[in-house]
Amino acid sequence: MLTEDNLEGLQEVVAIWNEWRRKYQGAEANSSGANLINANLSYANLNGADLHRANLRGANLKGANLSGANLSGANLSQSNTMAANFHNATLTDACIQDCNFHGATKLDAAICEYFH
């Protein structure tokens, strides 16, 4: 399980995180409530991660794989989501104020009852 201590490495070296995800494919990535303000998570493999109520304000999510992730109640304000993959992700109650969505951002089959 991903802990606060592991998040520092995640912010600094996405390649190490992605290798860990490849090696331990069945491991649960639980980062619910994590403080990831301005984190550089570009091209990170966050497939299926539990990021509900995580603070991703200003985070760089360019090209990140968030398919199937739980982002309910997460703060995505001012984040860069260019070419990020939100396929089948849960975005209900997420804050997307000033979020940089782009034509290449994949939102197909995303679950979102409401946002703010």
Image (cartoon, grey):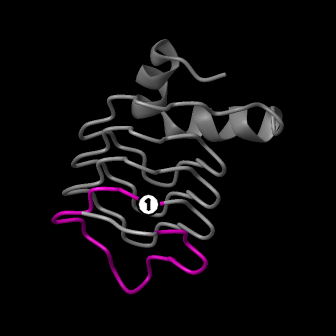
The image quarter in which residue 81 lies: bottom left
- Element carrying mark 1: loop
Relative image position of residue 60 (x, y in whole percent): 32, 52
Look at the image and say whether residue 92 sits in the magenta stretch.
yes
Q: Nearer the viewer, residue 63 or 101?
A: 101
Q: Is residue 112 above or below residue 46?
A: below
The residue beneath circle 1 is: 92
| Location of the N terminus (image quadrant) | top right
Relative image position of residue 49 (x, y in whole percent): 60, 43
Q: Is residue 100 above or below residue 12?
A: below
Q: Nearer the viewer, residue 93 or 26?
A: 93
| Location of the C terminus (image quadrant) | bottom left
> Which residue occupies 83% across, 36% down?
26
Q: Nearer the viewer, residue 20 or 88?
A: 88
> Which residue occupies 44% across, 76% down?
105
User: For this view, does 73 lie left or right of residue 89?
Assistant: left
Mark 1: amino acid: Thr
Which span is picked out in magenta?
A: 91-112
Q: Is residue 114 above or below residue 6?
A: below
> Which residue occupies 57% across, 81% down?
108
Relative image position of residue 57 (x, y in whole percent): 23, 46
Mark 1 burial class by Cα count in 10 Å: few <14, some 14-19, many 20+: some
The image quarter in which residue 4 lies: top left
Look at the image and say whether residue 46 sits in the magenta stretch.
no
Relative image position of residue 90 (x, y in whole percent): 53, 59
Q: Is residue 48 above or below residue 19?
A: below
User: For this view, does 20 lie left or right of residue 83?
Assistant: right
Provide the major secondary structure of the magenta segment: loop
